[in-house]
Image (cartoon, rainbow, N blue to C red):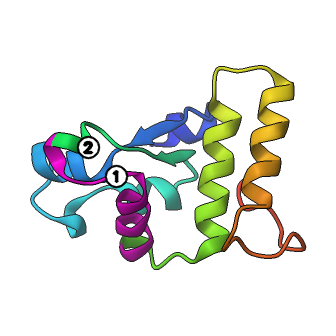
Amino acid sequence: MRRLADEAVTLNVCLSSNLVHLYPDRSAHPFPALHAAGVPLTVNTDDPGYLGIDLTGEFEAVADLMRWGLDELAGVSHRAVDAAFCGDDQKTSLHRTIDHAPMSPSSERSAVGR
């Protein structure tokens, strides 16, 4: 974990898929430990048709696991943009979209993880 954190290797986590294929339940998932160690994490879906969960559901699951609110969820979304394979102009636009999304915290909040 230390190397992942030290080298800022972003892990794209599909919590529901991991629980089907790797871990018996949420309490066994390493997401909290990875986050505590400073590993950059994103929230993703993996085969939503098979798993019956969409990205909103994945965010809800992570929020429940981590006891996160909108600030932390916005932060993990910003980390996903930072790790995306797109140009700076597109990243700037995506960050702006997250900051102004309905139901997002006020623009006065600090950007978690950025």
Q: Quadrant of residue 10?
A: top right
Identify the residue at horizontal 70%, vertical 70% (top origin).
104
The residue wearing badge 2 is 48
Say above or below: 5 vs 25.
above
Q: Is residue 81 above or below residue 98?
A: above
Q: Which residues are magenta?
A: 50-64
Amino acid type at image mark 2:
Pro
Disc 1, SS? loop
Residue in the picture at 57% in, 45% down: 40
Among numbered discs 1 and 2, the one appearing first in the sequence: 2
In-image side of 9 versus 33 (left or right): right
Q: Are marks 1 and 2 in contact (CB under 8 Å)?
A: yes
Q: Would residue 66 appear left or right of 76 to someone viewing this image?
A: left
Task: Please tell me how crowded label 2 is: few (under 14), some (14-19), or many (20+) other residues with Cα within 10 Å.
Answer: some
Residue 6 image point, x, y percent = 62, 37
The magenta stretch spans residue 56: yes
Indicate the position of residue 67 as horizontal and vertical percent values: 46, 79
In the image, 20: left or right of 100?
left
Badge 2 element:
helix
Describe residue 56's horizontal placement relative to residue 109 as left or right.
left
For the residues marked 1 and 2, what is the alpha-carbon distance in whole angstroms? 5 Å
Write the residue at 35% across / 43% down. 45
Q: Do we see residue 15 in this rendering? A: yes
Displayed quadrant of residue 25: bottom left
Residue 67 magenta: no
Q: How many marks?
A: 2
Q: Residues within 10 Å of mark 1 (few under 14, many from 20)?
A: some
Q: Which residue is mark 1?
A: 54
Amino acid found under the numbered disc labelled 1: Asp
